[in-house]
Amino acid sequence: MTALLQLERFTVRYGRLTAVNDVSLEAKAGEVTAVIGPNGAGKTSLVNAVMGLVPFGGRLLFPQWPEASRSIEARVRARISLVPETRDLFGPMTVLDNLRLGAFAVRVEPRFDMRARIADIFRLFPRLAERRDQLANTLSGGERQMLALGRALMLRPRFLMLDEPSLGLAPLIVAEMFRIIAQLKNEGVSILLIEQNARAALQLSDRAYVLEGGAVQLEGRAADIAADRRVIEAYLGMS
Ligand code: ATP
């Protein structure tokens, strides 16, 4: 499988604090790659730096789209998307307008059909269809997360990075969110999934990295990581 993202000795520093330390990582086409780890492990810093929101050291390559590593805009044009942990919705705007804004980078493509794309998103998230005219800042946490993901999907991403999509959601909505991520994977979207919910993340991932204190502690096939005694003790409980 071709690599879509390659990190080599990737490092993120905030002043004297090293949040991501010498990480090497690869995400392959058609796969879900999970990065799991505790609070403060550096997961958000990693993904924000990959998107170009935070400066980094080391090497970042998008082998399929060499120009994409130049700027955030170039990544968006290559249809690389990040759904940030902060969700970053346009609060005073409606659900529909938030979705329309998600398409700004592709709207200029002659074949782009805004109505059809929005209809696709509403099929995936019927809840958003019901609330199409509601302002984003009045949505529930789960609905907000659905809108943030729906907005990223307007771009028809070729590589989608999700920063803790299950964070703060009720168990039923968490299950729904993971069902949707699995569906996206089946549709062929390549995904980098940042999660604290290790069990659910490992179930739908192909490969996984365990990040602790900014460094990769363990990496491999998700099934092997889920069966690793250290991972079971630290992240999956004894069951
Ligand atoms: P969580 O799961 O709690 O979101 P995380 O694994 O995503 O954690 P990061 O948010 O990347 O971890 O944080 C890694 C470290 O970097 C933490 O010690 C955090 O306090 C620090 N950090 C993050 N952002 C900044 C910043 N803008 N300035 C200074 N330190 C930061």
Image (spheres, rainbow, N blue to C red):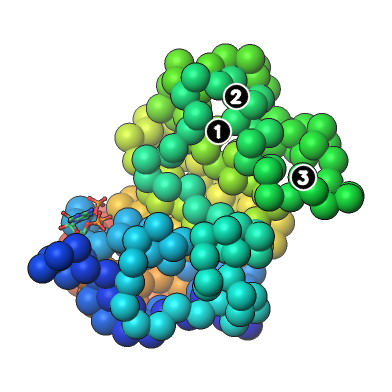
Of discs 1 and 3, which sits in the foreground?
Answer: 3
Which quadrant is home to the C terminus? bottom left
User: In front here: 177 or 70?
Assistant: 70
Q: Residue at point 74% right, 50% down? A: 106
Q: Residues within 10 Å of mark 3 (few under 14, many from 20)?
A: some
Figure check: 57 above or below 176? below
Residue at 15% across / 65% down in the picture? Answer: 15
Mark nearer the viewer, 2 or 3: 3
Where is residue 89? Give x, y as percent: 48, 33
Q: Secondary structure at mark 3?
A: loop
Res 229 visible: no
Q: Are marks 2 and 1 in contact (CB under 8 Å)?
A: yes
Q: Earlier in the sequence, mark 2 or mark 3?
A: 2
Label 2 to label 1: alpha-carbon separation: 7 Å
Q: Which residue is mark 3?
A: 107
Along the viewing direction, whichever of 52 and 151 lies nearer the viewer: 52
Is disc 3's CB within 8 Å of ligand 1? no
User: Reading the chain from its start, which is encountered first: label 1 or label 3?
Assistant: 3
238 is higher (above) or lower (below) than 121: below
Residue to which mark 1 is pinned: 147
Horizontal side of residue 64 vs 229, given as left or right: right
Report which residue position mark 2 lands on: 95
Q: Identity of the amino acid at label 1?
A: Leu
Inspect the image, locate mark 2, and give the three-letter code of the amino acid beneath it: Val
Callout 2: SS: helix
